[in-house]
Image (tube, rainbow, N blue to C red):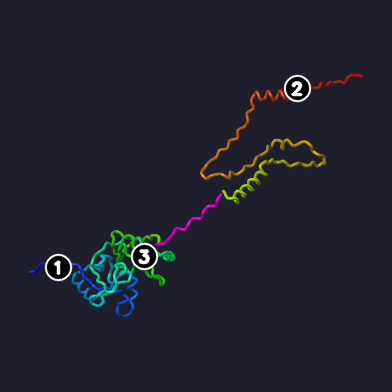
Amino acid sequence: MFGFNMFADSLRPFNTTYRCYSVSMLPGNERHDVEKGGKIIMPPSALDHLTRLNIVYPMLFKLTNPNTNRVTHCGVLEFVADEGKVYLPYWMMRNLLLDEGYMVKVESTSLPVATFSKFQPQSVDFLDITNPKAVLENALRNFACLTTGDVIAIDYNDRIYELCVLETRPGPAVTIIECDMNVEFAPPVGYKEPSKPSSPDISSDSEKLNKALIHEDFEREVNFRAFSGKGNRLDGKQKHTESPHTQSFAIVRRGIPDYDYKIGTLTFIRVQKSVETDKNKEEKNEKTFTPFTGEGQQLHKPRQ
């Protein structure tokens, strides 16, 4: 007969405490690949324990600092650490406020698949990168998950750029393994919007002088008479009378631009002509009319 405790190990999560060290303390050759990602190195006994517990792949872990209750999440890269030790990237130890040899609690966990994340560069130097989204996408291939509030570090062109994870969806911690995730960037820390150039002061003395000179040039050409030239006869005689065509053309007043015009306004200019009343006509005729001032003419001259 089988007992009820047969599957007890498969129901218990992995929960162990280790002494943590930075990757630079790992024996052997330097492992720069560990520093560039978000995965840790655990001892071989952890793999045996996880295998017996039937942990769901990919293996994801929750790291907790017992002294400060700071939490982050990570994946595992290898199981080659000394027994009782785990090796973490330096940026992860800073997020957890851990020093060399401090105790860290490692628990197995499962996280939702990421759909959105927002990052804030910690330096304006990040703006010098031509295609930041492509650089971030390439760097996140070495990460297994993201936690809101963490400051991750990515390596690009032999420089380390730090980015704060401002937001993750659909939860505060997500897995980014084989997922389609939308990425946004917040303005970097210390970034200032470029100031717009101030508009020139129209009331300055130089502007007033230019405005006056332009106005004077237009005043010189304000009165214009079309076809006001003179003709010459072929027989050389002088023509004293003005052409009736010339008389029919009135003086045309050229337009003067409105220097005080404001965009979005319409100005209607109405010229009011003086109306000549009958009384004004009578007064005018009385002034110009003198009776009995004509001269008589005879058809035949009188005989002498």
Which mark, residue 104?
Answer: none
Q: Amino acid at mark 2?
A: Thr
Q: Residue furthest top?
A: 303
Indicate the position of residue 277 as horizontal and vertical percent values: 64, 25
Q: Measured along the vertical axis of the image, is residue 126 above or below residue 290?
A: below
* Nearer to us in this view, 123 or 140: 123
Where residue 88 appears, as percent x and y from the top left, is: 29, 72
- Type of amino acid at the residue the image marks with label 1: Ala
Q: Is residue 267 above or below residue 147?
A: above
Task: Residue at 53% x, 52% y: name it.
Answer: 199
Q: Say which residue appears at 32% left-offset and 64% top-offset.
A: 150
**Residue pointed to by mark 3:** 163
- Image quarter in which the C terminus is found: top right
Between the C-alphas of marks 3 and 1, the distance is: 41 Å
In the rendered image, residue 279 lying in the magenta stretch gets the answer no
What is the magenta range? 189-202
The chief SS type of the magenta part is loop
Query: Is 194 inside the magenta-drawn segment?
Result: yes
Instruction: State the image coordinates of residue 268 (x, y, percent, origin top left).
Output: 56, 38
Can residue 77 be seen?
no
Q: CA distance from mark 2 to mark 3?
A: 104 Å
Which image quarter holds the N terminus? bottom left
Q: CA distance from mark 1 to mark 2?
A: 138 Å
Q: Amino acid at mark 3?
A: Leu
**Badge 2 density bin: few <14, some 14–19, many ≥20, Cα 10 Å:** few
Q: Does 119 appear above or below 46?
A: above
- According to the picture, the residue beneath numbered tag 1 turns out to be 8
Q: Is residue 300 visible?
A: yes
Residue 63 location, quadrant: bottom left
Q: Nearer the viewer, residue 254 or 27?
A: 27
Vertical comparison of 57 with 206: above or below: below
Q: Which residue is tagged 2?
A: 290
